[in-house]
Amino acid sequence: MIVSEKDINEQIKWAQINTDVLRSLENPRKAYWVALFICFAMFSCAVVAEVYQYQVGLGPTNLNNPHMWDMYIATFVFWIGMSHSGTLLSAILHIIHADWRKPIYRFAEAMTTFSLLTAGFFPMIHLGRVWNLYWVLPYVSDRGHWPNFRSPLAWDAFAISTYLSASMLFLFIGMIPDLAICRDNTTGWRKKLYTAISLGWTGNDRQWRTFRKTYLLMACFLIPLAVSVHSIVSSDFAVSIMPGWHITSFPPYFVAGALYSGCAAIITLFVLLRYFFRFEEYMTTAIMEKTAKLTFAIAMVWTYLNLIEFGATWYGHNMYDKELLIAKATGPYAWVFWTMIFCGMVVPFALAVQKFRRHMPTMFVVSLFLNLSMYFERWMIVAPTLSMSHQSHQWDVMWPSIVQWAIVFGSFGWFGILFLIFVKVFPSISMYEVKEMVYHRKREAELEGASAATNKPNLEGAS
Amino acid sequence: MKNYRILGLFNNFEEAFSALHDIRASKVPGVTIDDVTLNSPIEHPEIEEVLGDRPCHLPKFTLAGAMFGLVFGFLFLASAQATFLVQPQGGKPVIPLPSNFVLVYEMIIFFGVWATFFAFLFLSRLFRKRHNLYSEKVSLDQIGVIVELDKSKLDSLKDLFKQHKVLEIREEDIR
Amino acid sequence: MSLSNILNNWSHYRRGAEEGGHHDYEHRWTMAINLDKCIGCNACSVACYSENNLAVVGKAKFDKGQAMHWMRIERYFDESEKEFPDSGASFLPMMCQQCGAATCEPVCPVAATYHTPDGLNAQVYNRCIGSRYCSNNCPFRVRYFNFYSYYESSWPEPLNLQLNPDITVRDKGVMEKCTFCVQRIRVAKDKAKMADRRVIDGEFTTACAQVCPTSAIVFGDTMDKDSQVAKLWKKQQVERVVTKQNKSNSELRGYRIFEELNVDPSVMYMERVRDTEI
């Protein structure tokens, strides 16, 4: 049975949209404060662990000579990957005029920005001497020092600052008309805040014209940028000579993985926002279905690239690479490997079933599995290579310690804090774009109705 | 002398546009389409058809920013590397082109994006105080047509608005 | 000024290792290690600990793999299924190979590790921020990271008096590795400069070479054609900046580890000769 349903009810009134979305900014319920408290508690764990690590050194993390990187870098890649779908999907769907993005892009872009703010912590935390972090920046020093522009880590610093500023601006510019709506409908400190950050938007034709151009140009910049950012992150590995890292297909593999985990995270947050803010009218099952189909397609791309990597390693017959691949599948890290394969390659087939796509709790659980797989994927890239590199004398198996776990755990709390604050201060559905969507859908429906009415006699005559 | 500003609020685009068509057709002598500003909650896709082409110079700023990123980026990196001769590393040249390409690519986008943003702030004339005629209903669901005109034309324009089912008319003296 | 610098020296700044690289080398410090002579006594490792102020981390941290032995003796068993004395142990002293095209260098985000005009792979402790990328990209795994501050725990009073005053004690968060005893190289070079002569072969040597009871380790400058190490390299027909050695006599024992990775190591090993066929 095929159920076709509208992405959105086009009869919905513009004023109703304002009311519904602004309702989500009202004073929070008790559950919100509980969630915020939990996130804060999680974040505190990370702060405690980081202070300890700062004082003592990186020893308590269990890192050792072959394992110089571990969960911090894996988590860094995970959060960077998570940041990809928001902005990249929003920009691509904007350019190809897929208007079903409109009700869901705002929170996805916020997710992008906050994931980046979370990811940015990890290269700092993993440093041995974090207090000298600024040496990575290209500033003029009277000692004539520059960072090493050859290092992929220096590329990371450039790429992430570019991506962070671009995606923040994209989020902010897209929000200006909505901030003006908030300004017109609030009082007190909110009114002051929105007046300041809506920058005097009045919605006149000059502003709209410039706005459209700006938004389109930003989207055009963001697509190549997002692809390049994750390619550069993959260069952290691909530029090295280590077996299991020095792989040509890493940049597209990473980009696909980033989109994959990002889409999964969008589904997770979609379900949560829809449930907690009662956004059923806007975040409809039809849009969820489209998102799920997209996720399925990306999952298959990721699966393909993964299999290609295995195949190339197998037939390439490089001794180091091949042994590492066998060790991944059979060695001490095998359970992580097979969980990744199962959750990343088998579970997404649930998305191919319409019944599941339309069932929110199932989608929620599936998306969590997909993200688990993506986290394991990143960890499987970092850890096994280090445990089995060229020099067999230094082979070693290492599991991360509680300090690493605490910081990684806390990063989810930090993301949660930012996201929770965002949804209460900023409209998490784009009001003006949903108005546009409703307006266009209504016009299309009217045109179709009109043409159907005129065509009807002809059709009858033909039959 | 344009010493008056008048705002008419309409229920939907169709009614506002029919009023604008009449202005275009010079139903009110002395008031042209260039005196009109349209305030709306969303951008109508066919707005050029009623307001006429109004130029937007934004892409030029973007291009300038991106070009600056390209030239400045490469020169900055190359001159930094050429003065930091401790850089000979791993048997690679002092100025390595592949990594510089990667960084210049990022810098093109970095400067392009910021140039676009500042051009947006500048060209859309933000950071100005909203004038008294700004109506909060525009951000809700109504279409505002603002016309700057001479006082003598005021009544005939009001009549025109009323023909097209205007919901509310507000005026202000801007001498 | 910078622009004219780039334009005038463009071709020079574009020279990679294959075209001779940026440096006009003053010295090429190299080693030759005869594995047939190595008896696995670990004296080199101990000498390195005392010469270079290496931290003694203790048993627990050693087990976690956080040891700081710049010079380590790797044991391999050719017949591991047999009982101990017959299991065919062979030893490999492993230290930083001072690669000519080192993979650790280009990945450092702050250029803390670089190639010196002496052909050494130098590590600037003060510049290091501890990203540990260099260690990840080292195929020999000979870079050691200060996971803790050891200056109190490793040399309690009065052991601090044994520290070598010529070099520093590193604090937490810094990467370190074998320097070919760069402090001894400096002293020898300064002396030679003051006497207005070249460094004489055998005038000094590294701590590990100095203590080796069987003289398995030979250290010297291959730019000096008459040095012992240069003669050994020549005799074994091992060339630099090549990925595959072209030998007229396949019986020659000299080889460099991971030749195929094109990192151009400065250490030549001479294979062990066994009295039995394995």
Image (cartoon, coloured by chain):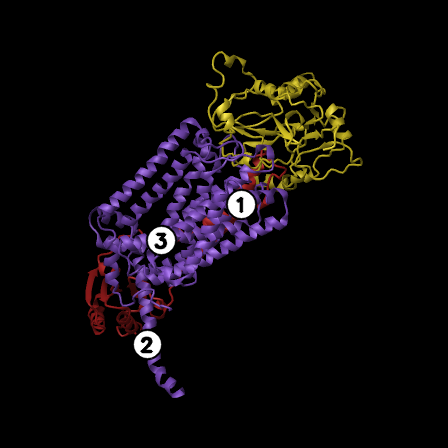
Chain colours: A purple, B red, C yellow
The residue singled out by tag 2 in the image is A449
**Percent x, y of residue C71:** 60, 25
User: Are the residues flagged by discs 1 and 3 in contact, CB closer than 8 Å?
Assistant: no
- Element at label 1: helix
Residue at the far bottom: name it.
Answer: A461
| Residue B125 visible in the current orientation | no
Are callouts 1 and 3 both on one chain? Answer: yes
Q: Quadrant of residue C13?
A: top right
Residue in the foreground of this view, choosing between B151 and B88:
B88
- Which numbered mark, 3 or 2, is in the foreground of this view? 3
**Amino acid at circle 1:** Ala
Residue at position x 26%, y 43% in the image: A34
Q: Position of residue A381 (x, y in %)?
A: 51, 43
Q: Residue at x 57, y 20 (%)?
A: C49
SS at mark 2 in the image: helix
The label number, if any, that marks residue A329 in the structure image: 1
Q: Nearer the viewer, residue A187 or B144?
A: A187
| Disc 1: host chain | A
Say which chain tag 2 marks.
A
On the image, numbered disc 3 is attached to which residue? Answer: A364
Answer left or right for A340 relative to A308.
Answer: left
Q: Specify which label sits upstream in the sequence, 1 or 3.
A: 1
Contact check, label 1 and label 2, Cβ < 8 Å: no
Q: Quadrant of the N terminus of chain A?
A: bottom left
Q: Is residue B139 above or below residue A398?
A: below
Q: Quadrant of residue C277?
A: top right
Residue type (three-letter) at the residue carrying disc 3: Phe
Q: Position of residue C230 (x, y in %)?
A: 74, 27
Label whose residue precedes the other's in the sequence (3 or 2): 3
Around disc 2, counting alpha carbons within 10 Å, would you say few (fewer than 14), some (14 to 19), or many (20 or more)?
few
For the residue marked with disc 2, what is the amino acid? Gly
Report the quarter where the C terminus of chain A lies.
bottom left
